[in-house]
Image (cartoon, rainbow, N blue to C red):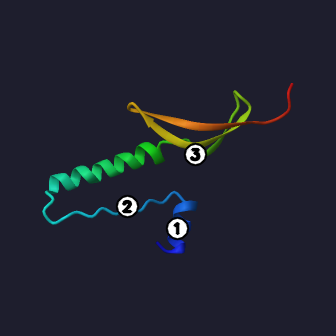
Amino acid sequence: KTCGECCAEACTDTDRFTLEFAASVEPETRGHALAALFLTDYMFFERDNGMCHYDPAQKACVITCCLCFCYGCVCPCNLYLPLGGNS
């Protein structure tokens, strides 16, 4: 990758996929692999609420560090930073 491609992937919500198949792979198998690629991208990178948001109920800034896949569930790993003073 070039420096520009790395910066674009780190700073924007763009996606770039590459799949390579042997010539002997059947079209149905290629379709399944492509569908799995898009599903994985959707589950882990498109469904989130953004990396950072404010939670008014807890008066905290919530930073999503990553999404973990555990027994069929996608579980966010969040960091909560309390805002404001103690009242």
Left or right for 4, reference 21: right
Residue position marked by numbered label 2 in the rendering: 17
Residue at the top extreme of this rendering: 87
Distance of mark 3 from mark 2, alpha carbons? Answer: 21 Å
33 to 64, vertically: above or below:
below
Distance of mark 1 from mark 2, alpha carbons? Answer: 14 Å
Distance of mark 1 from mark 3, alpha carbons? Answer: 20 Å
Q: Secondary structure at mark 1?
A: helix
Position of residue 30 measured from the top left corner of the image (x, y, whole percent):
21, 56
Q: Who's the residue at 51% across and 62% down the image?
A: 9
Q: Are marks 1 and 2 in contact (CB under 8 Å)?
A: no
Q: Who's the residue at 55% across and 61% down the image?
A: 10
Mark 1, Cα crowd under 10 Å, few <14 / some 14-19 / many 20+, is few
Q: Earlier in the sequence, mark 1 or mark 2?
A: 1
Residue position marked by numbered label 3 in the rendering: 50
Q: Quadrant of the C terminus?
A: top right
Please identify the quarter of the rendering in which residue 4 is found. Answer: bottom right
Q: Secondary structure at mark 2?
A: loop
Q: Earlier in the sequence, mark 3 or mark 2?
A: 2
Please identify the quarter of the rendering in which residue 84 is found. Answer: top right
Left or right for 60, reference 69: right
Mark 2 is on which residue type? Answer: Phe
Q: Who's the residue at 55% across and 41% down the image?
A: 49
Q: Which numbered disc covers residue 6?
A: 1
Mark 1 or 3: the one toward you: 1
Q: Who's the residue at 47% across and 42% down the image?
A: 47
Label count reads: 3
